[in-house]
Each structure stands twice: as structure tokens, then as C-alpha cells.
Image (cartoon, helix red, strand yellow):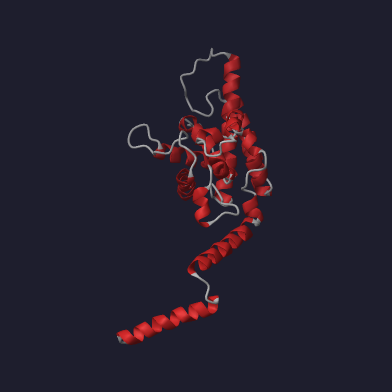
Amino acid sequence: MNDIEKDQLVDQSEQDSNDILGGISFDEKDQMIDSVAEAILNRIIDDERIKALKPLKGSIADSRRYDDRRKIEKNTNQSILFEDLVPRDNKALAASIKKHKWAKEYLDDIEILYEELDGENRDFPFGCTNISRRVDLFVKMIDCLRSLKILRRIEVFMVALLYQPTPAFIFFGTSGKRVKEETPLRLEEKMTQLGLEFLFLWSEKDFIKRLDCEYLSRNIKILEDFLKELDPSVGEKTTFTLQRDLDLGALFDLDNLLMKLKSFA
């Protein structure tokens, strides 16, 4: 094929494209593509499996620093840190995964097991420790309750991570260039329950890395090993931190960690 024939073929292809789109300008074509992409995205979001990931309305109020952040809502461009979003509980995530009978049975059974182990072994869940047997009973009780709470939340998170869609955020009804223009408060609304719960577990990473008991589940051992690999006591550590401002890049980094954890598992 000579150059003249190639030029004629390109011209014919452009003409065919214009015929199909009715002579629509490039800007209009881009707008149409964005509209189609947004329609597809909204259709996907209507899937019940995806809806289960969305934070419930009002769940933002469960974050540790919600009262302080209320003061900045009028200034939507003011920064928000990941640590501001750490949730106090995981009720919404637990409710979504416990809708599956097998998941509910597993989580109920593992909770009973951990409570029994805690009652039988004073060092649970850390293995042998140097904690004095004369430690204040009230302090020990508080530590036990905290330990069991974190173990339960790890189990719920890991089951949800392995058996539900994994994204840390979803751009509900937003696509294209508009994503980059989202304010921190708008970005926060797009985070999933799974993404928020990972922030809690990251805030407890030092506790999780100390877990050392042969009776802990594989789920907990996976998370423990993953955190030790990302944040070793010696050597290069991850740059991920809860002191990071919430922006699009931070959300992508959080999402990348979740994907790595799922692959690690």
C-alpha cells in the first residue's frame, strides 16, 4: 500500500467515525464518553455487593475526631488527615459480612474460642510475656477487653477482604476530570467501610505485630506477617502513614495496600 492509499484509508476511517457520531465535535465526543462511563459506573454501583461497601449515612460521626472536624466543614478545602477518619467501631462492616450464614457462623465461633483462650491463658494473645502476675486486676481486665476487641475486628476485616470487593474508595457518580477536583470532605464520603477499617488496623499495627499465639487464626497471622513486612523493626519501612492529608494520591496508596494485602493472603 503506497502513501496515497494510506492517506485515503485514514480519511475514510475519519469519515466513517464522523458519520457514526453525526459530525459531533471532539469536545462533545469527550463529554459523551464521560457520560457513558458515568452511566456504567452508576450501574455497577447499584450492585448489592458494592452497596455493602458504602459507609452508612452518619457513619462518619463514628470517627475519632468527628467533633473537631465539624468545625472545618464550612471550609471544604481544609485538609483532613487519615487519622481523623479512624472509625470507633466496625458495626457496619460486620453487619454486611454477617449476612452470609457461613461468615456469621465462623465469626461467632472464633469469638467464643478467643474468649475461652483469654480466660485460660493469662498471656493470650501474646504468648509468653514478662507481665507480672501482680499486675492490677482492673488494668488486666481493660487490656483483655481491648485485645479481644481488636482480634474480633481483624477477623471481620479479613473475611470481608477475602470475600467482598476490595476497593478502599469508590467514586460514586463521579468520573473523568471531576475526580481531581473533589474536596477532602467529598473524598471522605467516597471511602468504603473496608478502607476505613484498614485505617483502624493500621493505627493498631504495633499491637498486631506483637501477637504471638499458636491458637490465633490464619487470618490474624496473615495480617501480622503483612504488617511486619511493611513495617519491619529493622530495615526499610513503608511510607504510608495516618498523618497523611486525604487527597486522591493518598486514596490510591491506601487502595494499593489493600490490593497487596489481598494478594499476600
Q: Residue 217's x, y, as percent?
A: 54, 39
> Is any atom of residue 214 visible in this view?
no
Q: Residue 243's x, y, as percent?
A: 46, 33
Quarter of the image for residue 65 reads top right
**Residue nearest the viewer, comparing 236 with 156:** 236
Is the residue 11 above or below the residue 138 in the image?
A: below
Q: Residue 80's x, y, as percent?
A: 52, 36
Quarter of the image for residue 66 reads top right
Is the residue 28 above or below the residue 188 in the image?
A: below
Is the residue 216 above or below the residue 25 in the image?
A: above
**Residue nearest the viewer, comparing 41 with 232:** 41
Q: Which residue is drawn at 65% across and 57% down?
A: 47
Left or right of 7, for residue 252:
right
> Is any atom of residue 136 visible in this view?
yes
Q: Residue 255's x, y, as percent?
A: 49, 47
Q: Which residue is drawn at 31% across and 84% down?
A: 3
- Which image quarter holds the N terminus? bottom left
